[in-house]
Image: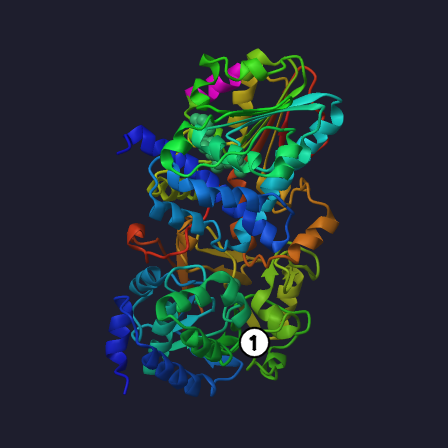
Amino acid sequence: MLDLDETIANIKECKFVPEKDVEELCSKAIEILIEEGNIQHLDTPITMCGDIHGQLHDVLTLFQTGGQCPDTRYLFLGDFVDRGFYSVETFLLLMALKVRYPDRIYLIRGNHETRQITTVYGFYDECLRKYGSVNVWRYCCEVFDYISLGAVIGGDQGVFCIHGGLSPMINKIDQIKIINRKQEVPHEGAMCDLLWSDPEDVAGWSVSPRGAGYLFGINEVKKFNHTNNISLIARAHQLVMEGYKEMFDKQLVTVWSAPNYCYRCGNIASVLAIDDNLEREYKVFEAGTMDITSLPSKKPATDYFI
Amino acid sequence: MLSPSQKQDKIVRSTDLDALSCRWNCVQKGYFEDVNIDKIINSYSKYLQFCEGYTNLSAGRTYKSVFDRKLPIINRGTYLRTKSISDIIGKFINDNEKCQIVSMGVGSDTRVFKLINPNINYIELDFEETTRIKKLTIINDSELSKAVNYSGLGATVADRSQFQTLDPNLHTDNYHLIGLDLRRLSDSNIVSEFLDSKRPTLVLSECVLCYLNPGENEKILKFWTDSISNLSLLIYEPISLNDSFGQQMRENLGRRGINLLTFNHFPTLKSKFDFLKSLNFQDINVTDIASIGGYSGDELSWISAEESKRIDKLDLIDEIEEIKLLLLHYCLVYGGIGKHTNLSKKWKLST
Ligand SMILES: C[S@@+](CC[C@H](N)C(=O)[O-])C[C@H]1O[C@@H](n2cnc3c(N)ncnc32)[C@H](O)[C@@H]1O
Ligand SMILES: [Mn+2]
């Protein structure tokens, strides 16, 4: 039997988690996630986090900034893996916390939590490198399929939380509830849009330069918030140098929680704490002084054009 | 043992393998074709072990890293760099009946094999070791020999001493591959001898001058403005923009021993512009790769809608903000003196 507290402590020290423990953790996580709806209705207070992308050391700083779990309740808005050098440990940590404290930490799915994207952006290679086989990657991808799609915090006039943004196919949050989410994220359609779209100063829906999802503007946001009786859309998915960015008369916010993204971007990060009065408090933090020379030896290089 | 300055030069030379790896990845992905790239790579696999500071083992490891997969963001940036420079070279050749191209720090660039014709005098410069590797690639390959009009013998090099004593230069009627430390460009006649100072000339620096200090940059560019009356100069290199991304880039590259010596000295497009102005260039145009690639939302892209559609299918770019940030830190600088090429491209800053 897995000792969760010990596993959590080990992961925080970046120690190797044996494959059989990963397997057990994944099946326990699935047991919990399978019960959660596509949209989870959550109480305040809660602290929201944007993309973390395998930057384990920065996730530890995040918990120091926002408060430790389970003392602080958390909602992570997806993109746990890829790009950073510790995607395995980062995702295992979140899963272990979820299994240990199921109602103190919630996860929703990002566009990187898929088989296709993780084979391109690092998580697959990392699993192969660290475990010598792709089993761990397979177990984790299995879990990805069960992670819910969004959340509503605080009921009436509350906060709608989603990784990417809106979809032209979704007017009402209830429409999300009937999506069959237990699958690889499709290349198009509502589920894809929710995980891929971005807010932008555009009139109406336009093509996204990312090649998936849409760009949506202030009108779409205001209409959606009005229809669904919410006051704010909180999403992640886009790098913001200042850690967070409010748009559209403060009816939408982007939260970004990976400081010095990819050990390259020089940005700061934030988490967003929502209190019982739905007041917002942004807590910003910077990348720790992690010694990059201590990174795993076969690390993918931090690339530039030279 | 290498002295500190030899070590530094070795690191600078090794950047050619990074550029090569980036291009190789782009070719694999279908961004562009390069039928000659494998020949150069093959040459590195044979001869890198004979280069200064390499052992058989370390050369093997370095060689293998050429085939490391690159992220989509790097492929896209490499494509934009290669295409934008090739576009300008193509325009220059079209504009001039007879012309001259000089590529400083040419490394393993294979453009010459496609472009050269009897109306072009093509000069390629790099450190001796690098030109030896290129020379061996050419003289031992019949197609490449034919391309540069070389009809001499091939050569076998079986050990370090044979490699180190091989003449680093290769001259044909209109192709000149010259092993030379650019810091000695103006002290020697080794280049002037093969230069036709009357011809319209395009001088290229693709990620090369950035490894030299501001004084050396000035000296090298002065050499060209003094030697050539109808001069087009094209520079591609990183800029710091004095921001946190630039700062981080300096640190990360510094950790690999790569020092960008003009990075903080010419941190912006404007400072590049002013530098060329101080050297009496008349027609000066600068832009960054983010604009060229259409990531700046400023209508200054060089990529047609059709081409965009094609390359979008090759790689999935997951993060637009990030690629924009990265590409903003790379600039393309063009300067013209006398009769030079009219580029008809969109620039961020022009005279
Ligand atoms: C980043 S590589 C670029 C190669 C090629 N221009 C390209 O873009 O693919 C830099 C090249 O500049 C050459 N280089 C740098 N400093 C040099 C110097 N002082 N003299 C001669 N070559 C130099 C290096 O040897 C290397 O081949
Ligand atoms: Mn995302």
Q: Nearer the viewer, residue B176 or B222?
A: B176
Q: Residue at x 52, y 72 (%)?
A: A115
Magenta-drawn stretch contains A157:
no
Q: Main secondary structure of the magenta part?
A: helix
Determine if residue B347 is in view.
no
Magenta-drawn stretch contains B219:
yes
User: If the image is split into quadrants, where does the C terminus of chain B sit?
Assistant: top right
Determine if residue A194 is in view.
yes
Q: Residue at x 43, y 48 (%)?
A: B63
Left or right of B133 in this view: B36: right
Residue A12 lies, with reference to residue B203, above or below; the image says: below
Q: Which residues are magenta?
A: B215-223
Within 8 Å of ligand 2, the CB of disc 1? no
Q: Residue at x 64, y 74 (%)?
A: A190
Q: Nearer the viewer, residue B167 or B248?
A: B167
* Mark 1 residue crowding within 10 angstroms, few (<14) / some (14–19) / many (20+): some
Q: Nearer the viewer, residue B176 or A266?
A: B176
x then y, percent, for residue B30:
64, 53
x then y, percent, for residue A299:
38, 56
Residue A33 lies, with reference to residue B37, above or below; the image says: below
Q: Residue at x 47, y 66 (%)?
A: A79
Q: Nearer the viewer, residue A121 or B13?
A: B13
x then y, percent, for residue A164:
55, 66
x then y, percent, for residue A179:
61, 82
Circle 1 marks a residue in which chain?
A
User: If the image is split into quadrants, where does the N terminus of chain B sit?
Assistant: top left
Q: Quadrant of residue A5?
A: bottom left
Left or right of A96 in this view: A154: right
Count how many numbered circles sit on residues in the image: 1
List the residue tagged with mark 1. A184
Name which residue type carries label 1.
Glu
